[in-house]
Amino acid sequence: MAESSLDLLHETHDIQVGWRAYELRPLNTPPIPPEVEAAHQERIAAGWPSVQQIARERFGLELKRMEGGHHPTRLAHIGAKFAIEHGKGEAYHRAVCRAHWQELRDISSPGTLAEIAVAVGLNES
């Protein structure tokens, strides 16, 4: 079963997907004013049921959302570059997304990322 719209597109068209790293809030960026952050979190919470419904209906996925604000992704992006260089980019990307969006695992944790790397066939060291 497709896990994303890109998977569906890939089924009908000859496309190549190239994942790119993008940090929403890199380390050491200025803090967001509390009132702006609160409004942002309210918008996310209001739209979340719709996101869950689309994921469930279109892809059969049960998405979960981590609470607690910002979750750094830099280490996961570095791991993705390593995985791509070793021919495991797609598997790593899917595993990290699954860990974050379905299993609520901390993808900023080196231990979590090491487990994912081993699970997709990368050397732990």
Image (cartoon, rainbow, N blue to C red):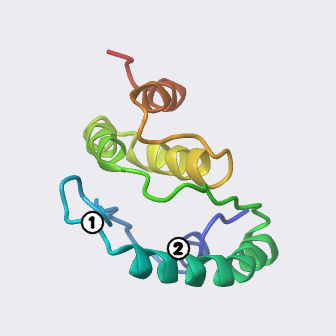
Residue 106 is situated, as x and y percent measured from the top left of the image, at 52, 40
Q: Which residue is mark 1?
A: 31
Return the x and y of residue 48 as percentages of the image width and height.
Answer: 67, 76
Q: Is residue 61 left or right of residue 18?
A: right
Q: Nearer the viewer, residue 80 or 23?
A: 23
Disc tally is 2
Q: Which mark is residue 6?
A: 2
At 52% from the left and 73% from the top, the residue drawn is 6
Q: Which mark is residue 93?
A: none
120 relative position to 55: left or right: left
Amino acid carrying mark 2 in the image: Leu
Which residue reaches farthest top? 125
- Residue at (34% x, 62% y) in the render: 19
Expressed as whole percent of the image width and height from the top left, the position of residue 74 reads 29, 48
| Quadrant position of residue 113 | top left
Q: Is residue 52 above or below residue 39?
A: above
